[in-house]
Image (cartoon, grey):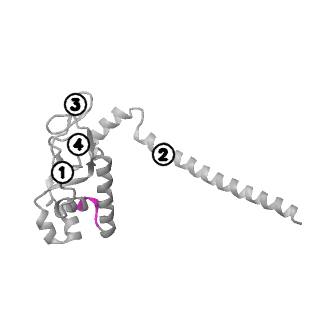
Amino acid sequence: MAFSFEDANLTRLINNDWIINTFGIKVFNSISHQGTINAGTIWGSSDQFLEFSNILYKWLLKYPEAVDQSGVNYLIYHEKILKDCIKITSDEYGPIITLGLNEGKRIHLYSDNNILNYRGQIASIVHQYDRHRNVKRVIKNKFCPELNEKKSIRNIFILSQIFIIILISKQLLSSYKTKIAKKKNNRYNI
């Protein structure tokens, strides 16, 4: 099982609030020095991932007011689950780069529009790319050059309307068939 760090420890205000509000100040103080594990970038074998997902799911049922990020950090640091199979990498040198809270570091683009981690290696996964306009544009141009945002929103709207029309048509057809069947049954039962 592997996780990636964000650039800051758990004292970042939002993580601070999530953990204190769910578990209290004592738990927060015991783990606050740890690096923030990003709940949006977890990977591993299918067995490991299913095991961890099951643990996290049960935990979220126990703490419905909590968020996944506080849960992941609590389970790893406080409950010390999966300690034998955990590998944690940083955006600094890992395969994942998280851009949402990159502390103002410059985002580097490679010549064919790959996003580089902070050591200059091509990032395999770019997490929260949509939080940076330039990166979002580069990724859109690289993987969906034929789409523009207004066109894709219009297309999604049109597709949703077609889907609704199909559902209504199926419902009307079903009602019509039911009425016809009842008429036939009534005709023969007189």
Q: Which residue is mark 4?
A: 96
Residue 90 visible in this rendered orientation of the protein:
yes
Kind of element beneath mark 2: helix
Task: Please tell me the numbered disc located at residue 77.
Answer: none
Distance between the alpha carbons at the discs numbered 2 and 3: 32 Å
Q: Which residue, given by chain and number where applicable, does mark 2 sit on?
A: 156
Real-space Cα distance between discs 2 and 1?
Answer: 33 Å
Numbered-mark total: 4
Asked where in the image residue 22 lies, by quadrant, the reply is bottom left
Seen at 28% across and 62% down, the residue is 67
Looking at the rendered image, the quarter that the C terminus falls into is bottom right
| Label pair 4/1, CB-CB below 8 angstroms | no
Type of amino acid under label 2 = Ile
Q: Nearer the viewer, residue 95 or 156?
A: 95
Mark in front: 2 vs 4: 4
- Looking at this view, is 138 or 74 the one in front? 74
Q: Amino acid at mark 3?
A: Tyr
Image coordinates for residue 16, horizontal then vertical, percent = 17, 64
Dot 2 and dot 3 residues touching (CB under 8 Å): no
Q: Is residue 58 magenta?
A: no
Q: Position of residue 29 (x, y in %)?
A: 11, 67
At 21% from the left and 59% from the top, the residue drawn is 81
User: Which kind of residue does numbered mark 1 sit on?
Assistant: Glu
Q: Choose the circle earlier in sequence order: 2 or 3.
A: 3
Q: Which residues are magenta?
A: 66-70
